[in-house]
Image (cartoon, rainbow, N blue to C red):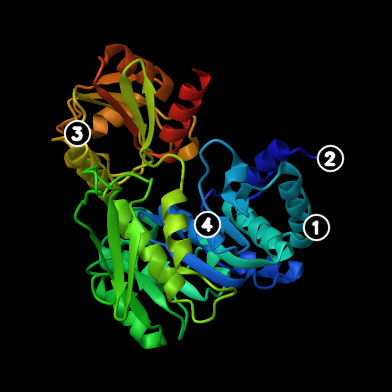
């Protein structure tokens, strides 16, 4: 029988005994059997703790505005697996993914692949056949042992290094940085989005001869003062990207939050650092791409009966601090009512601490349907004892928590749903049913 895409996804979830089993040996064996070559004329790999998806979106939008044929591989998805593989700005079809999965299954023999390894090979197989000018690969976890690292990137990017996935990557920024910098390649540019990268990152780059492009050191970004036209009307906000001998005055991204200027600046640097461009990259492409870049679940906003609903995938303390910064710079007229649900391996106390001063009321929800890392709301509440979220109203599902928060909200209030991709996906599905 021919498998449908849901059949395939169910199958690839269970052919390996572990959901996460880091290492490159298995995927290299199958990639060689598939005779995979380079997925695009140029390749940019994007790693980091936070900001990867937004940075990929900016790179993709700028390159497409220049007329390049672009493929982007990202994870996880929000509503549909197809979101993980985009070619020319469109999610690939079920039929394309099925064809790729069939080729992988025929080539893998007895090699057990994880769900992520299977998906990575499918993306690379589809990209090679699409004859891309640029392939953008988002690291799934860490970098050194991540499945995407079988590809030698022309430019590697590390957006930030902070505490997350400590069970796999290490207990501090130095250890985590050592894992993430594994995507760097000898004599190929490494773009760094942290003002103060861990010494493990800089040391490894030095040892292998990877030239670093460091934010606030080799390239810079800054908001420009607001200005008025001849009639006294406010002109659209602008910002400046610069390096020695180059200045770009650019529009403020549609993607909200102050941190998105940093992500956009890193994306510009990644493209500027490509030693050999597949095609020309005119100045206008930077402006057009940054103005039009979009990615779901990043401060994605809705309005329902005078209440603003904001959905965000932020899931660790660094992301929560960025989210709190946005709430301070764009305050709501009324209260902020939070709906929070997190996976069991996350630093929920650190997230609650980062959000303590910007949230007026909390609703907690369980993620029992999120697989082994999910959990019920009682377990989440127990981990939040002693935090600003202690004593919050508890709900079995995100949809129930969102309904309760909306029922409580008045005109001018803001309902914020955040905590994980699963949380955001549940909220978006609930809002879509409206």
Question: Farthest right residue?
Answer: 1
Q: CA distance from mark 4 to mark 2?
A: 28 Å
Residue carrying label 4:
21
Mark yes or no: residue 140 visible.
no
* Label 1 secondary element: helix
Residue carrying label 3:
331
Residue contact at pointers 1 and 3, CB within 8 angstroms: no
Q: Foreground mark, 2 or 3?
A: 3
Q: Quadrant of residue 362 in the image?
A: top left
Q: Residue at x 51, y 39 (%)?
A: 78
Residue carrying label 2:
2
Residue carrying label 1:
106
Q: Few, some or many C-alpha atoms within 10 Å of disc 4 (few <14, some 14-19, many ≥20)?
A: some
Mark yes or no: residue 204 visible.
yes
Q: Is residue 274 left or right of residue 84?
A: left
Q: CA distance from mark 3 to mark 4?
A: 42 Å
Residue 289 pos. (x, y %): 47, 56
For residue 395, the mark is none
Tell which circle, 3 or 4, labels the residue nearer the N-terminal end.
Answer: 4
Q: Foreground mark, 2 or 1?
A: 2
Q: Few, some or many C-alpha atoms within 10 Å of disc 2 (few <14, some 14-19, many ≥20)?
A: few
Along the viewing direction, whichever of 287 and 6 lies nearer the viewer: 287
Tell which circle, 1 or 3, labels the residue nearer the N-terminal end.
Answer: 1
Tell which circle, 1 or 4, labels the residue nearer the N-terminal end.
Answer: 4
Q: Few, some or many C-alpha atoms within 10 Å of disc 1 (few <14, some 14-19, many ≥20)?
A: few
Q: Is residue 255 above or below residue 272?
A: above
Q: Residue at x 40, y 75 (%)?
A: 190
Residue 271 pos. (x, y %): 46, 70
Residue 227 pos. (x, y %): 21, 51
Q: Is residue 263 left or right of residue 110?
A: left
């Amino acid at each position: 029988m021919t498998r449908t895409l849901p059949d395939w996804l169910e199958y690839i979830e269970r052919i390996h005994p572990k959901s996460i089993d880091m290492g490159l040996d298995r995927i290299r064996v199958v990639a060689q059997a598939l005779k995979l070559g380079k997925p695009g004329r140029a390749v940019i790999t994007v790693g980091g703790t936070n900001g990867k998806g937004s940075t990929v979106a900016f790179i993709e939008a700028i390159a497409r505005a220049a007329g390049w044929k672009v493929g982007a591989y990202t994870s996880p998805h929000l509503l549909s697996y197809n979101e993980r593989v985009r070619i020319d700005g469109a999610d690939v079809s079920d039929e394309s993914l099925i064809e790729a999965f069939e080729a992988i299954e025929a080539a893998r023999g007895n090699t057990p692949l994880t769900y992520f390894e299977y998906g990575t090979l499918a993306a690379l197989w589809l990209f090679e056949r699409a004859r891309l000018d640029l392939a953008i690969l988002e690291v799934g976890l860490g970098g050194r042992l991540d499945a995407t690292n079988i590809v030698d990137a022309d430019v590697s990017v590390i957006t930030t290094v902070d505490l997350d996935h400590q069970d796999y990557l290490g207990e501090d920024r130095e250890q985590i940085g050592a894992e993430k910098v594994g995507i760097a390649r000898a004599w190929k540019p490494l773009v760094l989005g942290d003002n103060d990268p861990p010494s493990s990152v800089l040391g490894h780059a030095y040892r292998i001869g990877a030239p670093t492009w460091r934010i606030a050191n080799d390239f810079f970004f800054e908001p420009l003062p607001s200005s008025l036209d001849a009639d006294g009307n406010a002109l659209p906000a602008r910002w400046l990207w610069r390096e020695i001998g180059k200045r770009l005055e650019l529009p403020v991204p549609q993607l909200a939050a102050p941190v998105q200027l940093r992500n956009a600046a890193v994306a510009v640097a990644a493209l500027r650092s490509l030693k050999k461009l597949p095609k020309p990259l005119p100045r206008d492409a930077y402006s057009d791409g940054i103005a039009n870049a979009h990615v779901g679940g990043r401060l994605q906003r809705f309005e329902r009966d005078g209440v603003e609903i904001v959905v965000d995938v932020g899931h660790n303390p660094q992301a929560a601090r960025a989210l709190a910064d946005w709430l301070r710079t764009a305050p709501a007229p009324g209260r902020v009512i939070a709906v929070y649900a997190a996976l069991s391996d996350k630093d929920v106390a650190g997230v609650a601490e980062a959000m303590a001063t910007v949230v007026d009321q909390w609703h907690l929800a369980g993620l029992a349907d999120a697989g082994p890392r999910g959990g019920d709301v009682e377990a989440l509440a127990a981990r939040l004892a002693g935090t600003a979220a202690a004593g919050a109203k508890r709900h079995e599902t995100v949809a129930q928590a969102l309904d309760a928060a909306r029922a409580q909200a008045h005109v001018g209030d803001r309902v914020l749903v955040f905590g994980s991709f699963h949380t955001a996906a549940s909220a978006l599905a609930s809002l879509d049913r409206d």
